[in-house]
Amino acid sequence: MGVNTHGFVSTRWAVSAMQASHRFGTFVSTVDSQRRYDMPKVSRNTTSQSLEVEGLDVQLGHLEGGYSVCFEKHTADAELAALFRGLPGDRCQLPRWGYVLKGNVSFIFPDHKETFEAGDAYYVPPGHIPLHYAGTEIVEFSPTDVLEKTIKVVMSNLHLSDTS
């Protein structure tokens, strides 16, 4: 009864299955489609935190689910190894998923360097040192808990460099 001569599920069976599934919470019916479910979002203009240091402007927002998004503008070339002193291997332990809007960005690993340019989406695993270039704009996503630990070390290292 549920299959026609062409081997496709009949419409009546499919609609009945969807109605039954809705009762058990696996499908959203057309009645529920009138409800609005807002997905978490953030833009450069709606971020909750910002950090501005010489050569770098970061706007940071946190999303539900344990991830954060960073909107970064780089106005000077910078090799950032000194900022990660104190982390394992004195390297950034933050995994990053990103997209280069403008310019390019590199990440230095113990055995190689990766460079991404405008239009590239990327993943960078822990154990790297970021290398920023003036004129670059990127958007990156990272786990919030690891990002917070990393920012704490970076801010401490920035403070130490300001006092020396």
Image: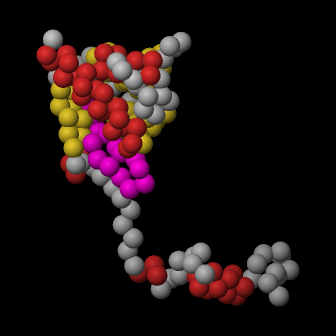
**Whether residue 20 is visible:** yes
What is the x, y in percent for residue 47?
24, 48
Q: How many marks?
A: 0
Tell me, yes or no, if residue 80 can be seen here.
no
Quadrant location of the C terminus? top left
Residue at the (82%, 81%) spot, across then down: 3
Outermost residue toward the left? 163
Of 155 and 105, the residue lying toward us: 155
Instruction: Give the magenta-colored segment's residue range.
Output: 60-73
Residue 155 at what x, y percent from top left? 24, 28
Expressed as whole percent of the image width and height from the top left, the position of residue 71 reads 29, 39
Q: Quadrant of residue 156?
A: top left
Q: Residue at x 20, y 35 (%)?
A: 51
Residue 94 in the image: x percent, y percent? Answer: 42, 32
Q: Nearer the viewer, residue 52 or 135?
A: 52
**Main secondary structure found in the magenta portion:** strand
Where residue 56 sits, quadrant-wise, is: top left
State the scheme by which the image is colored.
Answer: secondary structure
Residue drawn where x is 83% and y is 88% of the image? 1
Q: Is residue 71 magenta?
A: yes
Above or below, 63 relative to 96 = below
Q: Can you say whether 40 is above or below 11 in the image?
A: above
Q: Is residue 89 above or below residue 42?
A: above
Q: Is residue 66 left or right of residue 134?
A: right
Residue at figure coordinates x 75%, y 82% from the top left: 10
Residue extending farthest to the right is: 5
Q: Is residue 126 magenta?
A: no
